[in-house]
Amino acid sequence: MWGHLRASSSMYKRVASRDSMNADVESNSDLLENGEQEMTNPSWRYSCPHVLVATIVAFLFGYHLGVVNEPLESISIDLGFSGNTLAEGLVVSTCLAGAFAGSLISGWIADGVGRRRAFQLCSLPMIMGASLCATAKTLAGMLAGRFLVGLGLGVGPPVASLYVTEVSPAHVRGTYGSSIQIATCLGLMAALVIGIPVKNIVGWWRVCFWVSTIPAAIFALAMMFCAESPHWLYKQGRFAEAEVEFERLLGSAHVKSAMLELSKSDRGDETESVKISELLYGRHSRVVFIGSTLFALQQLSGINAVFYFSSTVFRRAGVSSNLANVFVGIANLTGSIVALVLMDNLGRKVLLHWSFFGMALAMAVQVFASSGVASYYGAFYFSVGGMLLFVLTFAVGAGPVPGLLLPEIFPSRIRAKAMAFCMSVHWVVNFFVGLMFLRLLEQLGPHLLYSIFATFCAMAVVFVKRNVMETKGKSLQEIEIALLPQE
């Protein structure tokens, strides 16, 4: 297509070997250091369209997480499993199972066929799965469709984090990373809005699934015109194409400096396969431990439990679940917009640290509300206020930062597979928190359960302070060299 025609017309006189490439960029290092090369930040306008296309997969992620919330009752009636709570739970959890399976292979797909092709591949099961759900006549058909959708969701978001990190200029990488969280919020809100007529129009839930095929198809087609990750191309030894894509993303004045940065972190082992044992016990184990722990603490904070319990809290005060979803959605979107503004100003570590601190404080308010000390109305206001504060502070840091920070701190060679491993941890913890929440709520009560969540948030504050490095404004190569000094 258009991008490939540009690449083929610009690749004459390009070197083909890694040694020649390194020699070429090193010959320009003195020029760069003396300031004769343009040293201003690259314009964000070059990379922005590519990032916006990539965030469509985050929109789909949010949409499919929320698409069954309102229509679930209608789905159960039409497909003949009304009142079967196990079947209703399977409609939700089967998507999570598919996402876990997809996340396990996402790194190998992204490294094998490239980021763009991985995006296009993940859109196929989302289109096929949504179509199956929309035409389902039985529970089995619905579950098969939900699993396929989950498979696509497991591949898409990790690759989106990789892609946005690798195509973004350092000075706006945090802002672009926050746009993923905003797209997810918009997807959730779109699912809620589209699901509103479901109680009044028979079979409307099928329309809810059909609608999702439109952005998925647009996403697959638009990716044909987007740039491939120059970092992936460099790993494949396709240096000429990497230069062409850097020109599309950064502008011609910054191509040589970008290629020089890539050569600095080149350890000569890019083509070697990455084994799971290397992620767990090798020289990269520390950053993988930080990444997987951040995702685990994100889920153990109780965010999904709070999302689930929000409707119940509002219903106790006679407020409809739709209005509850609106309040939670507004808090989530507001926090995400704040993160977008502050990510490249305050930095990742600061936002993550104070986000978890705010979440711990919000959970402490929830504990107080459920303790029986406050009056009935006081307990309600504290409970609602604590819940909205929790969602708001989560969206400021703990929500968007891990997905941005981890691709930044992972070395290029292991980035895709390490992200896949950490996302699989995310989905496993997510599944068990969702599975155990209601049972723990019955056995422990909200007072003790929220105390446990507050403790995990406090642990996250300490963990971030001791283990997370600041990556604001640094190139990926500078971060890699800082974490893994060249020997």
Image (tube, rainbow, N blue to C red):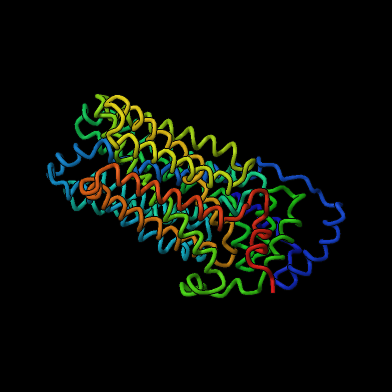
Who is closer to the viewer here, 344 or 179?
344
Q: In the image as oriented, which residue stretches furthest toward the front?
A: 373
Point out residue 24 in the picture as x, y percentages from the top left corner: 78, 66
Q: Residue at x 20, y 40 (%)?
A: 75
Q: Residue 311 lies in what quarter of the image? A: top left
Q: Which residue is drawn at 49% across and 55% down?
A: 159
Point out residue 367 in the picture as x, y percentages from the top left corner: 34, 39
Who is closer to the viewer here, 425 or 312?
312
> Does residue 1 appear in this view?
no
Q: Answer above or below: position of 460 versus 394.
A: below
Point out residue 398 in the picture as x, y percentages from the top left corner: 48, 46
Point out residue 330 in the picture as x, y percentages from the top left corner: 42, 30
Image quadrant for the C terminus? bottom right
Q: Answer above or below: position of 371 versus 17.
A: above
Who is closer to the viewer here, 332 or 14?
332
> Does residue 478 appear in this view?
yes
Q: Is residue 408 left or right of residue 440?
A: right
Q: Answer above or below: position of 123 versus 320.
A: below
Q: Residue 316 lies in what quarter of the image? A: top left
How many marks on residues?
0
